[in-house]
Every structure is written in structure tokens, then in C-alpha cells.
């Protein structure tokens, strides 16, 4: 099955590259990696931060979602390019070109990020199942674990079946939020103003903004995208590589545009439903219970369905990324069931100890945001090196934009750490 699935897709790719298959549909055979990576930008961590952003600050933090999405597009495109051109993923390149102690530190930070990711994904899926079927949260986590493990078994059948499964779940999430936008009375003028008018009203807004960055630009997605493209198409020369890079860039823009619109829809729905009269809503469970009397059972049910699809799909993708990170950095591959078990432990521990699930989701996104500079800096370094990328190295403009994006994330992280340790932040209320 693996041979047939991969071979059919790769044969179709070769026909496109040779010019024997043409037309708009030709690009579809290359679609998949960016769709899989885009799941990381619609995971349950986004739900938690976006609900808090919309409920607490209305439409005023939509610009953060847009900025985060643009940064994500750039870095996912660079990650895909590195995999296509070098045939190596980002973790492997780190192992090849950095000193061993640096590699081990990078791997440790990436593993912490993977656990923070799994915390958000597992809790999100479990919360959705628990609310929809009126079951204990721990039971929801067990069901989420079983379903995600079952889906991971499809990876043995080749990359195409997994891409189709993830693509279907992404479609469910997108459709659910399209429905939500029609149900909730959105103030479109205020939303448009929020997209183009940067503002951070207070220190809490800053924390949420950093959480949005952490929930949108994901460390494991940057690593994973390079792995998904590294040996997918059989390319004969640089001309073929240019075509594949072009197809990849188009897919990144389209897939992450959808993810960005979904995130904006989350914020707008929360702003419409909760900002006036229910601005204290900050938890997924409260959002669900408040949606029912405001917009009806259908709106609340669609919200939960999208959350479950998000939790399951992102958990699958997170495990795939974790395997790639470990194998790339330290050349070790664990059995899927063991990898799944290890990264689930923090999530089960949080629930067992009775911590607030949504608060844990938001803090996990802050952890991700702090871990994010590691793959971002590595990607900037490698994508700009001629000895690694050849003629495909980034030019001054793209490299400058990438450095600017990384600087924005680093600056937000430094300000957040100052806030956590009680250092006064000029211009922000406590």
C-alpha cells in the first residue's frame, strides 16, 4: 500500500515536472505538506487564546492574528524550500552543522515545545468530547488518545493517505467556522479596523498577544514542513526544484490564508458573542455554555465539532513532528505508541491535578512562543547559506523580512518575561 500510494503520487509529480501533465489541476499532486502544517495554526491553543482575545478586547487584537499569520507564511515557505532543495529536514541540518552541545540544547528545547504542543492539542480534543458527550474530561482524553493513535497507523500506508485525512479534518474546521461567522452578528467595520490598527491596551493584552504568536507560529510546524517536502518529489535538476518550490509557495499562501481566516473568525465570533456583557469569558467550557443561550444549540455544537477536529488532527501532526525532531537531532526513532505515550503525560498530569484546562492551554502557547526562536534562527541561517542552498539561498529582501519576523517574536518574548518577573513595562498598565 505504501509503495502504491507513494509511487502513484510521485509518478504524477514526475509527469508535471516533465511537462506531460499540465493545467491548474497539475499543481494538486504537489499539495499536501502545507495543508498538514496548517493544522498547527488551527490547534486548540488557538481556540483558548482567540476566545480570550475576542471576549476581553473585542476586535482590537485581530492585527496580531494577521501579523502572526504573515510571519508563519514566510517561515513555512522557507522550511519547505530547505527540505525541497537540500533533501534534508531542519533538525538534520542542525545536527550536521552545529556543535554537538548546541544540538543537544536545541533538541531539549524542541522536546519541551513538543510536550507543550501536545498539552494544548490533547486538552482541546478532550474538552470538546467531554462537553459534546457529557463525559469526564479524563475519559475524553483517553478517547482522544485512541483515535489519534488509530489515525497515526495510516502513516505506514504512505504520505498521501495521511495528507487526505488531515485535509478532510482541516475542511471540517474551516466549514464549522464559516457557519459560525454566519450565525454570529459580526461588526465587520470594527473587525476591519482591528485588523489594520495595532494596539495593546494593557499588560494582559500583551500576554494574550504573545500567546496568539505562540499558538500561530509553531516550532514543530517549522521543523515538520521541511521533513514533509525533503524526499517527496523526484527532481532531476534545479529547474525541477524551482517548479516544486513555486508550487510549494502557492500552497503555503493558500493553506495558511485559510488558517488565518479561521483564526480571525474565532476572534470575531468571541468578540460578537462575549465582549459586550460576557467579557469575563476566558475558558472554552464557559464559551460553550454561554454560546447555547446566546446563539442556540447549533452554534455551540458546531463550535465543539470544530474543536474536536482540531484536537485530533493537530495531535496526529504533533506526533509526526516529534518523531521527525528526535530522529533529526539525535538519530533516534521511537515506536509511535511510545512517542504518543511520552508526550501525553503532561496533559494527563494537568487534568489529574485539577488545573484549569483553558489556563493550561494559554500558558502552553506562551511556552511555545518562547521556544519558537530556536527553529526560526536556525532556518534563517541555513536558508541564507550558499554552500547549503546554492542558487536557492534567500535574497536580501526575504532574509531581511525573516530577520524582522524573528526580531518581533524575540522582542515580544523579552517583554513578556519582563512582565512575568515584575519589571515595569512603559506604556502598559499592570
Image (spheres, grey):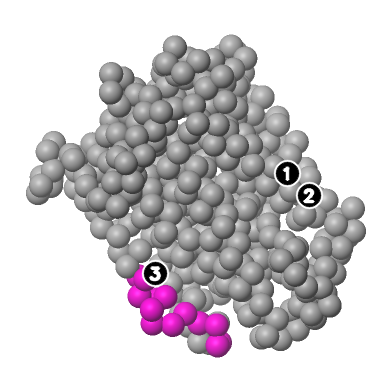
Residue 165: which disc? 1
Q: Secondary structure at mark 1?
A: helix
Q: Secondary structure at mark 3?
A: helix
Q: CA distance from mark 1 to mark 2?
A: 6 Å
Q: Earlier in the sequence, mark 3 or mark 1?
A: 1
- Per the image, the residue denoted by label 3 is 402
Count residues near mark 2 (Cα–Cα under 10 Å), then give few for <14, some for 14-19, many for 20+. Answer: some
Residue shown at the point (30%, 26%) measured from the top left: 275
Q: CA distance from mark 3 to mark 2?
A: 33 Å
Residue shown at the point (75%, 36%) measured from the top left: 150
Percent coordinates x, y for residue 240 in the rendering? 70, 81
Q: Nearer the viewer, residue 160 or 333?
A: 160
Percent coordinates x, y for residue 409 in the rendering? 33, 57
- Asked if residue 326 is positioned above or below residue 47 in the image, the reply reads below
- Asked if residue 384 is positioned above or below residue 119 in the image, the reply reads below
In this rendering, position of residue 380 left or right of residue 244: left
Q: CA distance from mark 3 to mark 1?
A: 31 Å
Percent coordinates x, y for residue 389 in the rendering? 55, 82
Q: Secondary structure at mark 2?
A: helix
Residue 161: which disc? 2
Part of the protein shown in magenta: 390-403
Amino acid at each position: 500500500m505504501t509503495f502504491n500510494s507513494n509511487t502513484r503520487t510521485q509518478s504524477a509529480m514526475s509527469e508535471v515536472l516533465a511537462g506531460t501533465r499540465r493545467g491548474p489541476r497539475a499543481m494538486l499532486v504537489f499539495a499536501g505538506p502545507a495543508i498538514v502544517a496548517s493544522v498547527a495554526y488551527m490547534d486548540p491553543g488557538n481556540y483558548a487564546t482567540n476566545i480570550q482575545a475576542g471576549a476581553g478586547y473585542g476586535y482590537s487584537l485581530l492585527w496580531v492574528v494577521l501579523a502572526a499569520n504573515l510571519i508563519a507564511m514566510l517561515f513555512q515557505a522557507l522550511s519547505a524550500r530547505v527540505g525541497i532543495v537540500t533533501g534534508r529536514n531542519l533538525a538534520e541540518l542542525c545536527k550536521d552543522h552545529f556543535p554537538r552541545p548546541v544540538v543537544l540544547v536545541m533538541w531539549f528545547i524542541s522536546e519541551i515545545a513538543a510536550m507543550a504542543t501536545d498539552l494544548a492539542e490533547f486538552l482541546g480534543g478532550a474538552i470538546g468530547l467531554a462537553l459534546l458527550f457529557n463525559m469526564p474530561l479524563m475519559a475524553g482524553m483517553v478517547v482522544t488518545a485512541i483515535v489519534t493513535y488509530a489515525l497515526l497507523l495510516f502513516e505506514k500506508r504512505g504520505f498521501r493517505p495521511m495528507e487526505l485525512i488531515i485535509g478532510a479534518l482541516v475542511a471540517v474546521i474551516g466549514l464549522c467556522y464559516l457557519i459560525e461567522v454566519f450565525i454570529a452578528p459580526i461588526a465587520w467595520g470594527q473587525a476591519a479596523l482591528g485588523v489594520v490598527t495595532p494596539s495593546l491596551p494593557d499588560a494582559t493584552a500583551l500576554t494574550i498577544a504573545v500567546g496568539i504568536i505562540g499558538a500561530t507560529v509553531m516550532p514543530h510546524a517549522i521543523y515538520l514542513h521541511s521533513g514533509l517536502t525533503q524526499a517527496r518529489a523526484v527532481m532531476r535538476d534545479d529547474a525541477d526544484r524551482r517548479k516544486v518550490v513555486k508550487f510549494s509557495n502557492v500552497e503555503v499562501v493558500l493553506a495558511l490564508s485559510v488558517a488565518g481566516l479561521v483564526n480571525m473568525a474565532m476572534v470575531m465570533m468571541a468578540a460578537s458573542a462575549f465582549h459586550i456583557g460576557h467579557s469575563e469569558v476566558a475558558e472554552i467550557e464557559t464559551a460553550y455554555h454561554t454560546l447555547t443561550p446566546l446563539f442556540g444549540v447549533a452554534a455551540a455544537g458546531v463550535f465543539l465539532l470544530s474543536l474536536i477536529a482540531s484536537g485530533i488532527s493537530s495531535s496526529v501532526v504533533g506526533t509526526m513532528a516529534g518523531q521527525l525532531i528526535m530522529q533529526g537531532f539525535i538519530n533516534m526513532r521511537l515506536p509511535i505508541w511510545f512517542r504518543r505515550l511520552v508526550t501525553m503525560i503532561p496533559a494527563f498530569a494537568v487534568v489529574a491535578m485539577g488545573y484549569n484546562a483553558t489556563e493550561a492551554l494559554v500558558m502552553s502557547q506562551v511556552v511555545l512562543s518562547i521556544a519558537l526562536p530556536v527553529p526560526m534562527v536556525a532556518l534563517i541561517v541555513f536558508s541564507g547559506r550558499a554552500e547549503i542552498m546554492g542558487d536557492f539561498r534567500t535574497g536580501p529582501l526575504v532574509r531581511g523580512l525573516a530577520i524582522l519576523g524573528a526580531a518581533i517574536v524575540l522582542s515580544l518574548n523579552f517583554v513578556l518575561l519582563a512582565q512575568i518577573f515584575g519589571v515595569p513595562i512603559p506604556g502598559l498598565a499592570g
